[in-house]
Amino acid sequence: MIILKSALLKNIKSFTSPDFRKTWVLVIMMFWVAFPAWANEERPSFNSSRYKEDYRFLQNPNQRTDFFDTIKYIPLNKSKSVYLSFGGETRQHYEYIDNNNWGKGVQDTNGYYLQRYLGHADLHLGESIRLFGQLMSGIESGRNGGPRGVDKDWLDLNQAFIDFKLWEKSGQRLKMRAGRQEIIFGSRRFFNYRERPNMRLSHDGLTGIYRTDNWDVRAFGARPVTLGQEVFDNKSRNKNTVWGLYSVRKNLPTNFDLNTDLYYIGLYNRDAVYDQGSEEETRHTFGTRLWGKVKNLDYNFEFLYQFGKFGRGNINAYALASDTGYTISLKGPAKVRFSLRADIYSGDDDPADADLNSFNPFFPKGKHISQLAASGLINQRDLHPRITLTLDEHWSVTTSTLFIWRDSLNDGVYSIGNGVLRSGQSSQARYVGTQPELEAKYIFNRHLDVKGIFVYFNAGKFLDETTSGRDITYLGSMLTFRF
């Protein structure tokens, strides 16, 4: 409590700074502008992947009940087959981490402030051609040691792609997407746009998309975009390439709700780094996901096997991931979901040989673990019971406890960005730590929400036996406005 009180007192000055006041004045203005939309609660929520939104229903003037509808659908010809849509969002995020990275490295004693701004334009040229562009800006204030690589980017293109519809017949559609794009697959465990940090992740790539009523099949080749901190300096490089084929089959003919993903993903990294060392990596992954819902029970199981080459050695790795939940309806709109996540991500068996058994999670979803995400999805076994209480359309509370072990005693602990945090060669302890978390969220309306997060990481024996094994305390608040 003394630590938390000290952090809050130290931040009073930063909260009352001119820059902070200007930011929150802007947010409050947007809040009041959105006020007329409170009465319109029937519309779907904004999609986190904004290019998936469709505003053609606004052709009907009677549907234009939101303040922002004048810019969500702008017809540009008489037949209205050519139209333009604008949108954006801002996220204002305060973070305080006591003993970041379990006390290793430069520490921040009073927290810091992160701002993210996204703005997009979506142009449809008839039914066959569509152009989507999205600008991104991120600002960091007050962090000791300066911004991390994912904290700051003054201005850059997060997305800029064009869609061509190549063929459509009898409910079957084929299109091509080319350019800078956010790529997501499945439950986003291993291929995600990196929503938890301040700056999102995109790829420069080419994607072919085939769809029917029950199938969604995507073939792609892409390179992840590396962030720069200045203006329009983000770029991708050929030293890191990913390609594959991802298929989703919904509504399998069974007596219960069953859907499946089947996929292959290839990865090349010229400078891959693991606890064993750094080498050129070419990795091939075959995976499947089974998911669905049976009455109040929902399930999501994923199995992956990886092979390939790491320098002169062979890759042999795997992952088993699961999320099973049961939802109970309470009085009125209230409901509670009890769930358990149980995962195994393989680690390296022997750092002295050339072979590698460490799983590669590609571009993992940090929030799948927690807002803190102190450790990543390599060489890890975990159990994660969760309870989510939804009181009404506004309030929800989630509490959970994450238990983490090392899978192999000969491999280390990694970050959510797949970097080595602690070598496994100085301790034979398996237990990494226990992490309880509490998150409360309030949704004002479809435009505006706010949440607060508390996380405590109790370092286990492995961290105690390595350098700087201190417990972590995390406090965060996040206000998001979308239009």
Image: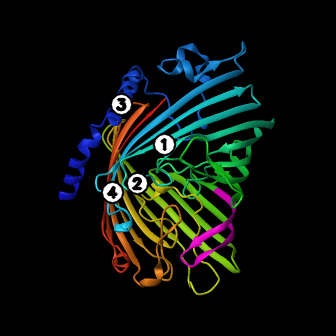
Callout 2 secondary element? loop
Majority SS type along the magenta span: strand
Q: Amino acid at mark 3?
A: Lys
Rendering coords of residue 123 (x, y %): 67, 27
Q: If you read the primary sequence from the N terminus, does the residue marked by circle 4 or circle 3 appear first?
A: 3
Question: Tag 4: Cα neighbours inside 10 Å, few (<14), some, or many (≥20)?
Answer: some
Q: Nearer the viewer, mark 3 or mark 2?
A: 3
Q: If you read the primary sequence from the N terminus, does the residue marked by circle 4 or circle 1 appear first?
A: 4
Q: Amino acid at mark 2?
A: Gln
Q: If you read the primary sequence from the N terminus, does the residue marked by circle 1 or circle 3 appear first?
A: 3
Callout 4 secondary element? loop
**Residue at far bottom of view:** 352
Q: CA distance from mark 2 to mark 4?
A: 18 Å
Q: CA distance from mark 1 to mark 3?
A: 16 Å
Q: If you read the primary sequence from the N terminus, does the residue marked by circle 2 or circle 1 appear first?
A: 1
Rendering coords of residue 441 (x, y %): 34, 42
Callout 1 secondary element? strand
Nearest the eye: 16 or 463: 16
The residue at 38%/77% (across/down) is 431
| Labels 2 and 1 touching (C-beta < 8 A) | no
Q: Amino acid at mark 1?
A: Gly
Q: Nearer the viewer, mark 2 or mark 4?
A: 4
Which residue does the numbered mark 1 point to in the structure image?
A: 138
Which residue does the numbered mark 2 point to in the structure image?
A: 371
Which residue does the numbered mark 4 point to in the structure image?
A: 108
Q: CA distance from mark 4 to mark 1?
A: 19 Å
Q: CA distance from mark 4 to mark 3?
A: 24 Å
Q: CA distance from mark 3 to mark 2?
A: 26 Å
Nearest the eye: 16 or 80: 16
Question: Tag 2: Cα neighbours inside 10 Å, few (<14), some, or many (≥20)?
Answer: some
Question: Tag 3: Cα neighbours inside 10 Å, few (<14), some, or many (≥20)?
Answer: few
Which residue does the numbered mark 3 point to in the structure image?
A: 22
